[in-house]
Structures are given as C-alpha cells and as structure tokens.
Amino acid sequence: MSKLLTRFLEFVKIETRSDASSQTIPTTIGQVHFAKRLERELQEQGLKKIKYNAKNGFLTGYLPKNTEKERVSIGFIAHLDTADYPAENIQPQLFKNYQGQDLVLNAAQNIIMTVAEFPNLKDYLGHTLITTDGTTLLGADDKAGIVEILEMLDYFLANPEIEHGDLWVAFGPDEEIGTGADHFIVADFPADFAYTIDSGRIGHFEYETFNAAQAEIIIEGTSVHPGTAYDMMVNAIKLGSHFDQLLPQVEVPEKTQGYEGFYLLHDFVGTISEAKLTYLIRDHDRKKFDARKQFLVKQVHDLNHQLDRERVSITLKDQYFNMKEVIEKEPRAVELAVTAMKNLKIEPIITPFRGGTDGSKISFMGLPTPNIFTGGENFHGQYEFISLEAMEVATQTLIEIVKTAVLVEK
C-alpha cells in the first residue's frame, strides 16, 4: 500500500468536524488532535520553524530552499475540519480496478451509489476508488489536500538534487464554517503566494470567488389574543414572508449559475411577536455586490414606511471578497498552476467559484492564494469519493508547480 493511501486512510478516520455553535478556536478538539498528529509528521520530515499556534489553530512549517539563487517562496494550505455531516466512526472502503458498476456502500442498509445518479463515476474506470460506508462523509475535503501536500514534501526531501525555493505549508481549522482563515497570520507565513489545495476533480482551479455578506432581518410584531386582534395584531411571520417576496424571485441559488449573483434565504424563524430572516448575499462583481446590499436596506426602509411604526431592522456583515482583485496583481500564482497542469497534460478547468475558500480571506490579507484541485468528488455527503490515482495526479501537480517555479524570477 502506498504511503499516500496509508496516510489518507488513517487521517480520514480522525474525527475533525467543525462546530459553528462553538466559541473556541478551533471549534472542536478533534481538530487540535489532528494538528498535533500532523505536527509529528512535519517533525519526522525535518521541516523547519514548525509551530502549532494554539491561539488560531494553524500548524505551519517550511522546507528551506536548497539553492543560493533567489527563488519564489510558495505556500500550500489545507484545512483540518470536515463539513457539517455525520463524521464519527468513518469507515473508508476501497474498490480496486473500478469497472463502471454501481457501488454497494452498505449492503445491510441498502445504500448504493448508482451510476445513474452519479455519472461522474464513469470517469474513473480502472481506478482504485475510496468511498464511505454510506453512513458518513469521507473527509477527502480536505484530508486529501493535506496528504497531497505531505507527499509533495516527501518528494523533494527524497530528491534533494532538484532545485526549489522555500516551501511553506499550513494546516488550519474551521474552513467549513468560514471562520478559520479570519485568524491566519500572514506575517508568520512569508510566501510570495500560496495555494489552497481544496477544490474538486482533476483540473479544477479557481481564482475568482464570490463577494459575500450576511444580512440579518429582525421583524417586531404585535401579538394579541386572536379573538380581539382586529386592527391590533401584527404578525411578524407574515411580514417576513412578505419581505421575502419583495426580493427578485429569480435571483436565488437554484435559478442562477456562472457569474450570476443571488440572495439566499438561509434561515427563517419566528413567532407572531418576532421573526428573524438570515440572508446570504453573493456576487462576483463588487459593484453589483454593493448594490445588492443597498437593495436590501432600501426594502427595509420602504417596508417600515408602510407600517404603523418602524418594525423592521437590518444588520449587514461582509464575510469575504472576490480574490481575483488581489490575484490579478500577482499573476505568477495563476500562470504557474496553469503551466504545471499543461506540462502534465491536464486540461485546466478554470471557472468562477460559486462560493469562497480560505484563500478568499488570506488573499485580502496580502497573500495571493488561488485554489487548486484535490481530485475528490461529491463532497459533504455520504456519496463522497476520491480515487487513489486522482490524489497521485494532484500530488504530481503540486510537485510540477514547484519545479516550474524555479524558472520564474522572484
């Protein structure tokens, strides 16, 4: 069994699900345990300046350059946590030399991953597929990224004659709940640019993300006995439903794609006396993004003018911004990744990412950080899978990025 596969099978069994309701950093102790396990791994590899920062949950270290020449310093970043889906007692299983059949993940519970429902399986004929047992996620997002970074380091440690610049690595917490990168310290990670290893199938590469904000709408109703409610009751639930109808009904996730932005009613809880609506606002274009936020503010203002008094309030919070604004100023990060993939006969799949990554926030901290593939599929659920060969290709891509970088002026 290859070291890559051995590591992966060990790591996915470590429970690291993050918890949005927690106030600690990281939000779960499993992430701390995993970081400590990886700290030992980096120590065994002989990396320098290895540090687990208990204040922000990031483990960092670097492999020093092996040349006197001035070379670019590259960072590689992956996250410790897994998504909000059952992640206890993960039981990975292997399907060797896959031949296009439906995969029985769990015979006892009749959980089957069918080709009809998941036609992407057909892209992996002859591969060794790694799946769950159908009761949990797998955790390839992002333990595949972690393993691929470690494998890349192993390669350069085993081949010291191959010239490279400083190679920094970071493994951080709570990416899945969008808070981990808030605490990243760029000053402790002196790379010229970096990559998050956190995208999907082979070839995927993103350097455009959404601009993102959250809006919380609070509606104050008036609750009185329904028998005497005439001209007195104001039902906050109905006002909330009315407010949602004021928004463009086609500008929602299920009706948009590509560069189209949206409003997502993420939560709606309430009683007659009070309702709370939480919206996610997304757009790739900064001007359109700002206009979306102002549109919500205007709807609140206009609705209040129709009521007996001001009953509706709004709180807006920016979450992250489109990393393209930063990465356009440092094109080497994109050029290197695209060149490396083409050198390996991989067709780059470059699309606007309809979401955000840790790199979205880290880029605006001053470290341009696009996102590159791990090779995984069907993330965040029981049908998640990855192939051994895809992880090997991802590792080769990271190696090729480093090799290609020696040809680039610092």
Image: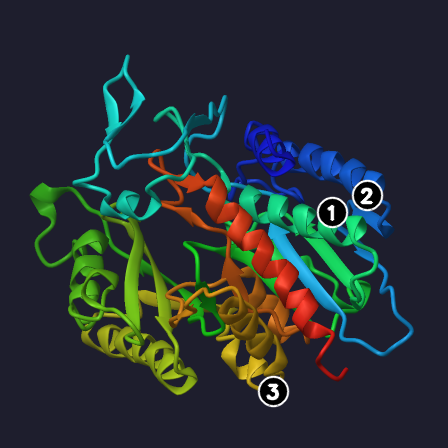
Residue at image point 35% right, 44% down: 124
What colouring style does the render use? Answer: rainbow
Residue drawn 54% across the image and 47% down it: 392
Q: Mark 3 or 1 closer to N-term? A: 1
Mark 3, secondary structure of its residue:
loop
Q: Earlier in the sequence, mark 3 or mark 2?
A: 2
Pick whichever of labels 1 and 2 is earlier in the sequence: 2
The residues tagged by marks 3 and 2 sit, at their Cα atoms, a distance apart of 34 Å
Q: Give neighbour class at mark 1: few <14, some 14-19, many 20+ (Cα, 10 Å).
A: few
Q: How would you rate the neighbour count of disc 3 (Cα within 10 Å): few for under 14, some for 14-19, many for 20 or more?
A: few
Give the residue pinned by disc 1.
Answer: 154
Dot 1 amino acid type: Asp
Q: Which residue is mark 2?
A: 45
**Image location of residue 212, percent across then percent down:** 44, 69
Farthest residue, direction top: 108
Asked whether, in this view, residue 21 is left or right of residue 279, the answer is right
What crowding class fits label 2: few (fewer than 14 Cα within 10 Å), some (14-19), or many (20 or more)? some
Circle 2 SS class: helix
Percent of width and height locating residue 258:
29, 72
Q: Quick one: 57 or 72, which is closer to the camera?
A: 72
- Position above or below: 9 against 154: above
Quarter assignment of residue 70: bottom right
CB contact under 8 Å: marks 3 and 1: no
- Please tell me whether residue 397 is drawn above or below residue 53 in the rendered image: below
Q: Position of residue 29 (x, y in %)?
A: 65, 33
The residue lying toward the viewer, choosing from 317 and 353, is 353
Residue 329: assigned label = 3
Q: Secondary structure at mark 1?
A: helix
Contact between marks 1 and 2 (CB within 8 A): the answer is: yes
